Image (spheres, coloured by chain):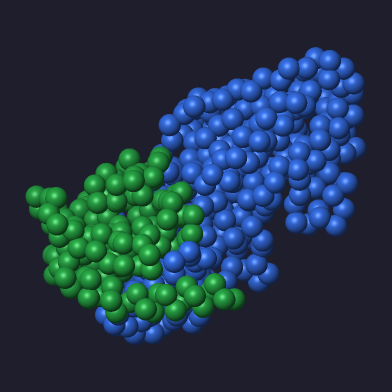
């Protein structure tokens, strides 16, 4: 059996926050002292172009992956999956639900009874430039992918401990007793790739039931189905930047927008009973009158209007536009019967409400 | 550049060039051809301090309503949504800031510009009117800040 290193992928954050950059650098420095890892540093995972060198490098990797990135673990896993970098979610010991017993970190549950680490089970995902269109029917390899959210801790130690546990488990499982001799001076491979900010949905296929609600709801052509009638994000870059509406209508909370400010949409905690409404300033205080579907319909209308199309109103299916939809020239979403309250909040916008004064409300401290 | 006007924020002297207009959300606006170029005024930059991350949630070109949420900013001192200073058509964002937003701090009135809009400048303030606006909002801002510091 070929021995395999544990690949550690560090996805750099999109922000210049010095503490975050320092954490990344310290992690790389500490990991180079570990014998049995190979390190790949790439730009922010979510923004990577599907046909760029970072994704090409990720697709080459065989065997267990540890991925450190600035998004929720679930968002990390399914972002990679969409790129064709596939495996099964591994328990890191840092997941909130693991915190009761972090010592249980290790390979994925499903594979616990299988002969661990068989190379035949660890084929990487399909290596094609169009893997976003690869049918889900393609077998997902059983290799574990351990996703760690770098926003969770401010120091490197919890991550290093988790990685050490993963290395130990992997070495045991794959009987890689000689690994430390083979990988005495680990490689740090740094892919320096220019990226642009992207915005697209990521499907959590561990939850998706292929009910196709998202296809019916999204009027921008983002979603498609493969030959087995299973949903996929066919044209991610048709997605309207900032629009998370399909995530709100998904009955299984299977759609993730990793960059959304609401954790339930960004791949964090599940909301029992479905997604709650977004109380952002976009719709003002009137939002607590809206359920997730109504918010979603309004968000979709906003983005339809921005793209020069007619609003569809509250109708969920593309072929059932609301009959009371107003012409696009009003530059307002179609009005539903609950939108009057938010019109009132629009009226209050003409009063002196200063957005930057609202900003001050959030300041931690200011040395004036 | 013409003589700047100044506003005292505590010990800090915020300067405002008089060759442009200002919006109440503390952005400056300077006509360039048929568009207005916007950036953060010194008042905003002082409150934000070092900018680490700038993100836009709309794509240019696009039509905007007044105060429509268009993005977010993260800095040493704050995180905030950003909103449209005017209703109109946003034509272009300053792409240079996406990889490195530090020009907002280094050159707020020049290279640190944020975006350009085709919009009526009605509703913008002259430098004199903007300073009067600051006189009105600064005491409130101070109270808010001090209230938070005492917590």
Could you tell me if residue B89 is visible in this image? no
Which quadrant of the view contains residue A350? bottom left
Q: In front: A208, or B88?
A: B88
* Quadrant location of the N terminus of chain A in the rendered image: top right
- Chain corresponding to green in the figure: B
Q: Does A57 sit left or right of B89 as displayed?
A: right
Q: Residue shown at 29%/47% (left/top)? A: B107
Q: Position of residue A144 (x, y in %)?
A: 75, 36
Which quadrant of the view contains residue B87? bottom left
Q: Position of residue B39 (x, y in %)?
A: 27, 55
Q: Does A82 sit left or right of A171 as displayed?
A: left
Could you tell me if residue A68 is visible in this image? yes
* Quadrant location of the C terminus of chain A in the rendered image: bottom left
Residue at the far front: name it.
Answer: B11
Q: Position of residue B10 (x, y in %)?
A: 38, 68
In this rendering, the answer to whether A342 lies above or below A225 is below
Residue at the far left: name it.
Answer: B33
- Chain corresponding to blue in the figure: A
Q: In front: A139, or A162?
A: A162
Q: Residue shown at 46%/34% (left/top)? A: A49
Q: Residue shown at 38%/60% (left/top)? A: B46
Q: Residue shown at 84%/15% (left/top)? A: A181
Q: Does B87 sit left or right of B145 as displayed?
A: left
In this rendering, the answer to whether A131 lies above or below B119 is above
Number of marks present in the image shown: 0
Q: Position of residue A225 (x, y in %)?
A: 52, 45
């Amino acid at each position: 059996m070929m021995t395999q290193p544990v690949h550690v992928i560090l996805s750099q954050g999109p922000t210049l926050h010095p503490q975050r950059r320092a954490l990344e650098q310290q992690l790389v420095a500490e990991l180079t002292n570990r014998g049995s890892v190979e390190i790949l540093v790439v730009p922010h995972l979510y923004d990577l172009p599907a046909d760029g060198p970072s994704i090409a490098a990720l697709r080459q990797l065989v065997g267990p992956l540890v991925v450190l990135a600035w998004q929720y673990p679930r968002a990390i896993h399914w972002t990679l999956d969409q790129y064709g970098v596939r495996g099964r979610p591994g328990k890191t010991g840092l997941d909130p639900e693991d915190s009761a017993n972090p010592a249980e970190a290790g390979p994925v549950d499903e594979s616990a009874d299988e002969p661990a680490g068989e190379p035949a089970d660890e084929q990487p995902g399909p290596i094609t430039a169009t893997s976003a269109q690869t049918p889900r029917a393609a077998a997902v390899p059983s290799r574990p992918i351990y996703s760690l959210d770098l926003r969770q801790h401010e120091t490197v130690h919890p991550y290093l401990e988790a990685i050490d546990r993963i290395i130990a488990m992997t070495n045991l499982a794959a009987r890689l007793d000689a690994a430390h001799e083979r990988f005495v001076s680990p490689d740090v491979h740094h892919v320096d790739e220019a990226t642009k900010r992207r915005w697209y949905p990521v499907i959590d296929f561990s939850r998706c039931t292929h009910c196709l609600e998202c296809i019916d709801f999204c009027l921008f052509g983002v979603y498609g189905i493969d030959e087995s009638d299973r949903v996929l994000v066919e044209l991610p870059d048709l997605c309207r930047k900032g629009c998370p509406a399909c995530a709100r209508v998904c009955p299984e909370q299977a759609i993730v927008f990793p960059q959304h400010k609401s954790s339930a949409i960004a791949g964090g905690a599940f909301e029992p009973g479905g997604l709650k409404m977004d109380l952002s300033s976009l719709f003002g205080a009137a939002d607590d009158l809206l359920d997730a579907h109504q918010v979603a319909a309004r968000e979709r209308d906003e983005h339809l209007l921005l793209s020069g199309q007619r609003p569809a109103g509250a109708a969920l299916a593309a072929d059932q536009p609301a009959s009371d939809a107003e012409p696009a020239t009003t530059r307002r979403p179609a009005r539903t019967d609950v939108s009057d309250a938010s019109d009132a909040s629009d009226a209050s916008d003409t009063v002196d409400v200063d957005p930057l004064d609202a900003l001050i409300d959030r300041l931690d401290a200011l040395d004036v | 550049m013409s003589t700047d006007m100044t506003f005292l924020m505590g010990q800090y002297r915020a300067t405002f060039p008089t060759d442009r207009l200002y919006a109440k959300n503390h952005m400056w606006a300077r006509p360039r051809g048929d568009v207005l170029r916007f950036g953060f005024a010194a008042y905003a930059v002082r409150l934000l301090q070092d900018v680490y991350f700038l993100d836009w949630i709309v794509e240019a070109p696009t039509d905007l309503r007044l105060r429509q949420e268009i993005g977010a900013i993260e800095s040493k001192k704050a995180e905030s949504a950003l909103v449209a200073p005017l209703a109109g058509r946003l034509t272009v964002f300053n792409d240079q800031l996406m990889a490195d937003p530090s020009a907002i701090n280094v050159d707020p009135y020049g290279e640190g510009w944020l975006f350009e809009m085709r919009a009526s400048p009605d509703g913008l303030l002259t430098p004199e009117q903007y300073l009067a606006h600051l006189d009105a909002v600064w005491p409130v801002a101070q109270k808010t800040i001090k209230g938070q510091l005492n917590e």
